[in-house]
Image (cartoon, coloured by chain):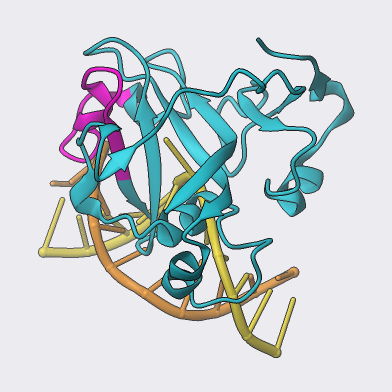
Chain colours: A cyan, B yellow, C orange
DNA sequence: GCAAAGATCCAG
DNA sequence: TGGATCTTTGCT
């Protein structure tokens, strides 16, 4: 299965009240404090899995939440994992994306630079416009524009996007 | 040991 | 719009 990452959220270390790592290392978030390039998979609301990729140096607790994927390959298998037909919502939203890719909690702490979980570097044509908005579903520091998505891609979670959009926080600026 | 909140999703 | 659903955490 292959998916293109089209929407992410950044979670910083101890300075970020909304981050799981803000209150220090626990048994749940310990992999978030690992070295960059490792996965942090956790269960949310008792039923959904979310995938993060650790980005900061070891001990800092910085990670990026994968919020939405554009299905590229293995769409039939992803459909089966999700038990839905519509491709448009196949892997939009953190819980759906994780489920579509068939992730399990056992992937927590594994490297994302080799199978079974592999994230490739961005292609050079990814100089599309990237938009930022405040993060979603959190109650602290939610003014920070740490959510990123591809403006020209339809596979990000639109409903939440408009629901949470406030003009003052919306930035439209190219990134890289 | 208990209570509460939580980086969500789906049906109605 | 609200309910499902349950793990993790923090406090007693």
Q: Is residue A88 visible?
A: yes
In terms of image quadrants, where is residue A7?
A: top right
What segment is highlighted magenta in the picture?
Answer: A23-41
Is A35 in the magenta? Answer: yes
Direction from residue A8 to residue A27 in the image, left or right: left
What residue is shown at x 38% (from left), y 16% (from top)?
Answer: A13
Placement of A65 over or under A59, stated as above or below: below
**Who is closer to the viewer here, A25 or A127?**
A127
**Who is closer to the viewer here, A35 or A117?**
A117
Q: Is residue A138 visible?
A: no
What residue is shown at x 76% (from left), y 14% (from top)?
Answer: A174
**Which x, y percent locates residue A94?**
50, 49
Direction from residue A51 to residue A127 in the image, left or right: right
Placement of A88 over or under A136, stated as above or below: below
**Which x, y percent locates residue A50?**
40, 48
**Which x, y percent locates residue A52?**
39, 36
Direction from residue A45 to residue A150 in the image, left or right: right
Is A161 in the magenta? Answer: no
**Who is closer to the viewer here, A147 or B3?**
A147
**Which x, y percent locates residue A110?**
20, 36
Quadrant where the image shows the N terminus of chain A: bottom left
What residue is shown at x 70% (from left), y 18% (from top)?
Answer: A127
Instruction: Residue at the far right: name it.
Output: A167
What residue is shown at x 19% (from left), y 30% (from top)?
Answer: A30
Placement of B2 over or under A39, stated as above or below: below
Quadrant where the image shows the C terminus of chain A: top right
């Amino acid at each position: 299965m292959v998916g293109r990452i089209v929407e992410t959220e950044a979670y910083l270390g101890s300075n970020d009240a909304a981050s799981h790592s803000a209150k220090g290392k626990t048994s749940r978030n310990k992999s978030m404090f690992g070295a960059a390039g490792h996965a942090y998979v956790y269960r949310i609301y008792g039923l959904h899995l979310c995938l993060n990729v650790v980005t900061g140096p070891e001990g800092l607790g910085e990670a990026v939440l994968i919020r939405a994927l554009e299905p590229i390959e293995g769409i039939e298998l992803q459909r089966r994992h999700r038990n839905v037909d519509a491709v448009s919502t196949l892997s939009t939203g953190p819980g759906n994306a994780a489920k579509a890719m068939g992730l399990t909690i056992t992937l927590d702490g594994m490297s994302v630079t080799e199978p079974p979980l592999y994230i490739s570097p961005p292609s050079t044509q990814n100089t599309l416009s990237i938009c930022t908005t405040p993060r979603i579903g959190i109650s602290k520091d939610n003014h920070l524009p740490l959510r990123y998505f591809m403006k020209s891609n339809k596979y990000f979670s639109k409903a939440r996007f408009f629901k949470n959009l406030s003009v003052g926080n919306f930035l439209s600026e190219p990134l890289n």
